Image (cartoon, rainbow, N blue to C red):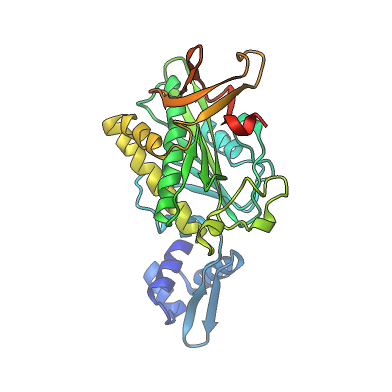
Amino acid sequence: MRTDILELLRTAGDGYVSGEEIAARLGVSRTAVWKHIQELREAGYDIESRSRNGYHLRETPDLLLPAEIERQLTTEVVGRHIVYSDETQSTNEDAKKLAAAGAADGTVVVTEFQGDGHGRLARGWFSPRHKGVLLSVILRPQYALPQEAPQFTLLAAVAVVEAMRACGVTAGIKWPNDILIDGKKTTGILTEMSAAMECINYIVIGIGVNVNTTAEEFPSEVRDKATSLQLATGQPVNRVHFAATLLNELERLLKQVRTAGFAPILDVWRRDSVTLGQPVRVIGMNEAVDATFTGTAVDIDDYGALLVDTPTGRRRVLAGDVSIRPHEAAAK
């Protein structure tokens, strides 16, 4: 109902729509219209009311509200159900609970602030309230096997880069899933999965993007390593538009996978990679991983593993058990 009221107010442009007209067009009472208008105001919509004229939408809030995102979507599945909160501990944790309870393919969990945001290898993720895009997408890919799950991380990275390109920003991908602008990190991606022996029950892809964070808002310890879209463009970026663009890109790429497989996605990932062709140092994160070694990142395989040429031969590096850095920086 509130979405329908908003659409009528938007259609009116600079004009007014009477409560009586809204009630008649939506088949509800004027009292019901008034209650919904009040709820919209509480959500942050600036709605002016004038006696004998009706209602006028003056401004929409800078919030990642489902109704605002949905009106910019061109998708059939992704984002057609959006769960919003002003604050949560983790969108991935929320999404996993929803997925376990049967949430539909393409469900999106979005928030303005995460109290316990983290990325790959349990690293923390910082994003001030109302400055980033923090979301998780539930996928139920019936065509994929568990060993193919890492490919969805690469797909998400490509989707982010494409969404940034649509905003006029050129970004690159540091293996496997960090998005860099001018060498500084702007995005983290965390993919988690529930699977049986030969099938995936669901995949949750968590994406955190620094959109309008200023340099002063970054903690001092990461200020020289992190950036945002606003810093890259020199002006604030509409978060709702970026979120919708990202979800549209995700669905476009998912459709491509169903028709052509992951090969085209991997080719785009290679094109946008800032890791391939570079000297790297692979650092084992636990005792199960072989000793730290150096080499040159030459490619990724069909499952997204990094292929590194070393003096003793080519080695295959999995995303889940290593950290990778430029050799020169790691040697300092």
Residue 313 versus residue 28 in the image, above or below: above
Residue 16 versus residue 110 in the image, above or below: below
Q: Which of 251 and 33 is in front in this view?
A: 251
Residue 108 versus residue 332 in the image, above or below: below
Left/right of residue 230 with respect to residue 214 in the rendered view: left
The mark total stands at 0
State which quarter of the image contains the C terminus: top right
Residue occupying image coordinates x 52% and y 87%: 51
Left/right of residue 69 with respect to residue 251 in the rendered view: right
Residue 305 versus residue 84 in the image, above or below: above
Q: Where is residue 220 in the image (x, y as percent from the top left)?
A: 73, 49
- Quadrant for residue 131, please give it: bottom right
Left/right of residue 252 with respect to residue 191 in the rendered view: left
Q: Position of residue 277 (x, y in %)?
A: 44, 30
Residue occupying image coordinates x 31% and y 33%: 264
- Quadrant for residue 155, please give it: top left
Q: Is residue 64 visible?
A: no
Q: Position of residue 17 (x, y in %)?
A: 43, 79
Q: Is residue 22 visible?
A: yes
Q: Which of 147 and 294 is in front in this view?
A: 294
Farthest residue, direction right: 220
